[in-house]
Amino acid sequence: MTPVKIGLLGLGTVGGGTVNVLRRNAEEICRRAGREIIVSKASARDLSRARICDTSGIELVQDPFDIVNDPEIQIVVELIGGDGIARELVLQALENGKHVVTANKALIALHGNSIFAKASEKGVMVAFEPAVAGGIPIIKAVREGLAGNRIEWLAGIINGTCNYILTEMLDKRRDFHDVLQEAQTLGYAESDPTFDVEGIDAAHKLTILASIAFGIPLQFDKVYIEGIARITRIDVAYAEELGYRIKLLGIARRTKEGVELRVHPTLIPHRRLIANVDGVMNAVVVKGDAAGPTLYYGAGAGAEPTASSVVADLVDVVRTLTGDPENRVPHLAFQPGAISAIPILPIDAVHTAYYLRLSAEDRPGVLADVTRILAGHNISIEAIIQKEALTEETFVPVILLTQQVLERELNAAIREIEALDCINRPVKRIRVETLG
Ligand code: HSE
């Protein structure tokens, strides 16, 4: 069989890693795919830059359109990122009848529906395993490995930068801004780190996971997103004292009313395996009705972990070049005509437990007022602790854990609590998930 020629759009960290993995494991990859895979062209903005890979035998070009318009190239690997030029290139590649592998989570989350429609029209594949959780084969696990299940919920640590920051805040009692700076220097963060800390990167990935879990269209604009910038060392320490770790979780849950789709800092009991996923590592728990909970753990970014997913997608595509193209795995796991219009719930319709931190005047009757308000909204208290005053003030921190509550009710209760003279505004709140 003749080798399959591929072109890389972008020859940075992941592009370089992909070349290295393809070279190093060429023989085994060929045995798996049935054809040899050759990188014939790669594009880079600066051709003179030093690379992490050996580029001999690869034609380097500055204009990425040289690759998507090259009739010899059968598969285009998009590693540019963002939804600007990358989108144009992917659409052009599809128009030209080429298969696409992409690591671009923003592109798939924001424009995947139209990209997949174009791919189906042209009879080609778009594969995106590297877009979610780097080296963890989570797309394949959910789309194919769990295909027999009705998936009930999934929850993931899917942004390594945030997880690194929260881990350092806990382990070394460091401040948020200090750790963020370090994460940028170490190269974990996105080029715009607000995408990480504000939860946008995780929301892109959650959008994709929810679609393949529930058979719904990609709906990034309906994800509730809250980042970690307001998490303090104090909350991390109090949560630990109560037996919880704070993690930025992406949660997708099917309920009778619709689908919850949310990214926010979350207290998780520290006996849960996922609560112990530290540093830049990623992990996703998927709860299927048949398999029960399954946990996927690994490197969520980096040259070779992400290249591992790029190459796995390349192998899948190459296999279909010789197999039955009518029987490909559908892009979003479910057959295109069977995508469901289940509503995505607004955040105030979500049921979850809460960690509340109040700054309360230290005098009799204050806690009675607070608990009366919570009881009036049918909110049960799971735990309550009062801490020493942080300064010389007469106000003290009071930490409350509630049982599960409808968010709308909790909002109403918090408004009443914040109106009390004996409570300083705002009441700090972080959602709690037991993931049981
Ligand atoms: N900035 C991302 C992260 C990289 O921190 O997880 C991988 O998508």
Image (cartoon, helix red, strand yellow):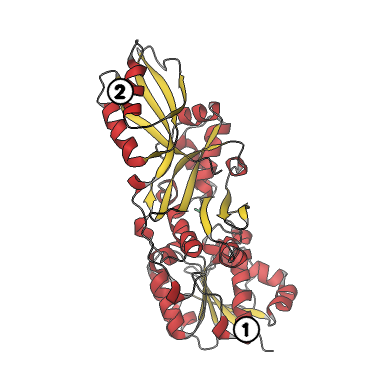
Left or right: where 405 falls relative to 164:
left
Task: For the C terminus, give its image quadrant.
Answer: top right
Q: Is residue 135 visible?
A: yes
Q: Residue at x 41, y 21 (%)?
A: 398
- From the image, tell me which residue sits under label 1: 4
Q: Is residue 93 visible?
A: no
Q: Secondary structure at mark 2?
A: strand
User: Which sits in the foreground, 188 or 309?
Assistant: 309
Q: Amino acid at mark 2?
A: Asn
In the rendered image of this protein, does residue 123 appear above or below residue 180? below
Q: Position of residue 265 (x, y in %)?
A: 45, 41
Task: For the N terminus, give its image quadrant.
Answer: bottom right
Q: Position of residue 142 (x, y in %)?
A: 57, 62
In the rendered image of this protein, does residue 316 appear above or below residue 287? below
User: Which sits in the foreground, 250 or 51?
Assistant: 250
Could you say which disc has been placed on residue 33 in the image?
none
- From the image, tell me which residue sits under label 2: 424
Q: Position of residue 248 (x, y in %)?
A: 48, 44
User: Which sits in the foreground, 92 or 181?
Assistant: 92
From the Cβ of disc 2, is ligand 1 less than 8 Å away? no
User: Which sits in the foreground, 306 or 153?
Assistant: 153
- First in residue order: circle 2 vs circle 1: 1
Tell me the distance, in whole angstroms, between the alpha carbons under discs 2 and 1: 65 Å
